[in-house]
Amino acid sequence: MSTTHPTNNAPTPAHKRVRTGRGGRWVVGVPYVWLVAFFLLPFIVVLKISVSEMGTVHPKDLLVWKDGGLQVMGDLGHFAAMAADPIYLGSALRSVQYAAITTVLCLAIGYPFAYFMARARKSVQPLLLMLVMLPFWISFLLRAYAWKGLLSPEGWAHDLIVGLGLDTLMAWLGMIPAPGQLMNTPFSLVVGMVYTYLPFMILPLYGTLSKLDLRLLEAAQDLGATPWVTFWRVTVPMSQAGIIAGSMLVFIPCIGEYVIPELLGGPETLMIGRVIWDELFFNNDWPRASALAVVMILMVIVPLALFRKYQAEAQEGPR
Amino acid sequence: MIIQRAHAWLGRAWLAAGFAFLFLPILSMMVYSFNDSPIPNVWRGFTLKWYQALGSDTALLAGLWLSLKIAFLTACGAVVLGTLAAFALVRYRRFRGRTLFAGMVSAPLVMPEVVIGLSLLLTLVSLQRSIGVPERGMLTIWLGHLLVGMAYATVVIQARLRDLPPALEEAALDLGARPHQVFWLVTLPMVAQSMLSAWLLTFTLSLDDVVMSNFLSGPGATTMPLVILSRARLGLNPGVNAAATLIVVAVGVGVAVAGYLIARAERRRAQEAAAAARA
């Protein structure tokens, strides 16, 4: 993503000359109007609906002419109801919980992976990189579906896990409800999400780790640090940018994930994306669905804002 | 020495395990698609019957055709809008509402698709209630895909445009080319390759999309991923395995060919640049 690019190139005179006076209006205007109409406006509509009262079929108007004046017929009840209802609150918390678990697992698997990739012979690195990027081209849906075939009672991964007796341990840890039952559990959901988002973690980590100045590691060892200390005191801090970028790339989409819980999750893994869907299409409750969407936006924006702040500080500070 | 040896072995083992984790599920699915038995674990011999069955699967074929049409239109629209937006962001450093514009361009990359789909759906349905159009279907799915596709196309094209050396355009201007000639003859050919990459990326994104399509589809407009999703929800399905195998192979070949062509064009351009520098 472009966010890692430094944007410090100053405007050059040539660019000013090349822009044509009248063409510019269209170059900026067409995408601008399009984005306002189909991106900004819909968000305002959702915000509006989230504080509207529900009529019989669709939400009532927010502003009403009444007694010769404009009255706001707002209703913040949806947000209050959400905070009180364990279904909504629970699904929001669960989304954060599963996103966090997935992020930590991706980091635990992906960091050593990216580290060893960056230490592999230079000649094989492009191939390894291509292999990591290959799954990006395979649809999310099919990748989630593939795990369905592995973890259902007829799949070989199921046989392997049960054969090794790992299911008893997982049931004891609460990842699955009972031994032998792997599909549609928190376990299958997390496996599917880790599987899908692992490349998003590996790529930024590899990006920072492959640029690491190896002389710094040698210097640390010359000064008497053990490999273990060198790793934790030099390598990890120097790859902080990659760790944070990768974690964001995993955490944020996991919050809004819809397809993977739909195929691999179960009744106890209800996440907020699915609840929005149900409110809209089964209960036809637009305000509730909109209010949930607003909550989801906030859940995404907070980590994003922290990420941006960190990036800005990292660019300003000494490298 | 021993530590280094262990380190190398651990590295190889970790990479191997990681790649196994990334690829075995997809490969298993492809193997299952040739299994005569519908139960994955029971290998009853090689068969192509699931592929033959696809030929008469009208729902899936109709979905595929619709998906291809939407993906084609999405890719074309996204490249046009993305090119304009990239030029606006790179070449026009100051215009009113630039911050808002930059934010709106990149927001679809991070906003959950559920939120984008829901907000677009509610807006379009409200619009339809007041003026009668648009009907939910192919058009509304296309609008949704275009919104997300444009964001990706802008990122790809913007990256190339920003790295463009200004000297070439300055040279063209100094040699007397009109600004519009500079644009069509110098600037555009130089970003054409990133436009092609953006086209391919948005095409595959649209072809794969489930969430936006799920929100924005109407009766009679079921894209292929929606057909697959509804079947996959019900359980394992050898037909889905076969369709998935074909999709993975088609996308893999397409990406490989495109990658080869782009690499070749890149090499040729590098050679030309080197030759020009020597001359």
Image (cartoon, coloured by chain):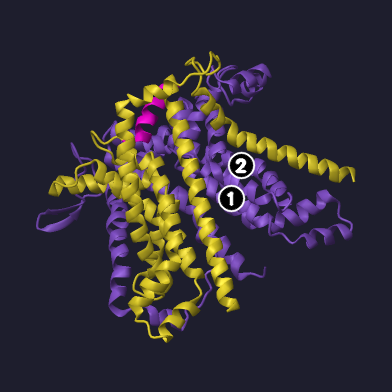
Chain colours: A purple, B yellow
Q: What residue type is labelled 2?
A: Cys
Q: Could you say which is closer to the camera, residue A65 or residue B48?
A: B48
Q: Could you say which is closer to the camera, residue A123 or residue A41?
A: A123
Please give the range of residues in magenta. B223-237
Residue A50 visible to the viewer: no
Which residue in the protein does label 2 denote? A106
Is B224 colored magenta in this rendering?
yes
Residue B254 visible to the viewer: yes
- Picture quadrant of residue A56: top left
The label number, if any, that marks residue A246 in the structure image: 1
Q: What is the distance, in whole Å, between disc 2 and disc 1 at their CAs?
A: 9 Å
Would residue A308 be found to the left or right of residue A170 on screen? left
**Residue A99: where, in percent of width, then height?**
53, 41
Would residue A56 be found to the left or right of residue B100 on screen? left
User: If you read the primary sequence from the N terminus, does the residue marked by circle 2 or circle 1 appear first?
Assistant: 2
Would residue A56 be found to the left or right of residue A232 on screen? left
Q: What residue type is labelled 1?
A: Gly
The residue sitting at 40% across, 53% down in the picture is B199
Chain of the residue under the numbered disc 1 shown in the image: A
Chain of the residue under the numbered disc 2 shown in the image: A
- Picture quadrant of residue A38: bottom left
